[in-house]
Image (tube, rainbow, N blue to C red):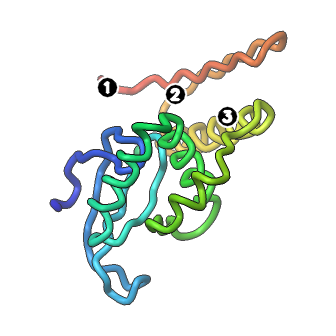
Amino acid sequence: MANGNNDQCPICSGRVDVLTTPFTRYNYERVSRFTCPRCGVFDIFEQDVSRLSGQIGRISQDKPWVRALLSYWIRKAQSAGEPPLFQRNLIDQIVSEQRLPTAHEQADNLIRYLGEQLRTKIREGKPVSFLTNSYRLSVVLIVQESGT
Ligand SMILES: [Zn+2]
């Protein structure tokens, strides 16, 4: 697998950047580090990537919500420190929970996400507009890309 190319995310099947290299954290085993706009940053042992991707594909044919559930789980596991390691034995465990976030948790997650986006854009020196509507949960984050 080439480094830095655009590949398909094994979890949400969206476009993703992948870096495959031996990591000291995993005793120099080769690991693919995925950076997905939806799922975030996570690791999978290189030897597991295609089997794991196939397993998720098969499960999602009967249960279309599985990709959203796994994506939510992996995003939640990134709260601090190193990216989480996603392994095949996690799939059954996560799927058996069958629980996507409640509306309240989704609102909390949205606020957390917007905060992270704002922090990143401000750090990059990009102009940001932030609009809210106090009657309903309606938040718009506008990031103006400079020079494009
Ligand atoms: Zn993804």
Q: Where is residue 125 in the image (x, y as percent from the top left)?
A: 49, 38
Residue neighbourhood size for the residue with mark 3, other residues' Cα within 10 Å, grouped as few (<14), some (14–19), many (≥20): few
3 vs 1, front mark: 3
Indicate the amino acid at tag 2: Pro
- Residue annotated with mark 2: 127
Q: Is mark 1 on a helix, strand or loop?
A: loop
Q: Quadrant of ligand 1?
A: top left
Indicate the amino acid at tag 3: Leu
Question: Going by the picture, which residue comes out furthest to the front?
Answer: 62
Quadrant containing the N terminus is bottom left
Q: Position of residue 65 (x, y in %)?
A: 53, 36
Looking at the image, which is closer to me, 62 or 19? 62
- Residue annotated with mark 1: 147
Residue visible at 58% across and 46% down in the picture: 72
Q: Is mark 3 on a helix, strand or loop?
A: helix
Residue visible at 52% across and 28% down in the picture: 127
Residue 89 visible in the shown view:
yes
- Residue annotated with mark 3: 110
Quadrant containing the C terminus is top left
- Whichever of labels 2 and 3 marks the residue nearer the N terminus, that label is 3
Q: Where on the picture, by quarter, is residue 23?
A: bottom left
Number of on-image labels = 3
Residue neighbourhood size for the residue with mark 1, other residues' Cα within 10 Å, grouped as few (<14), some (14–19), many (≥20): few
2 vs 3, front mark: 3
Residue visible at 58% across and 51% down in the picture: 95
Relative to residue 134, is residue 93 drawn left or right? Answer: left
Q: Is residue 29 above or below residue 75?
A: below
Indicate the amino acid at tag 1: Gly
Cα gap from disc 3 to disc 1, whole angstroms: 28 Å
Q: In this view, does 146 lie above or below 19?
A: above
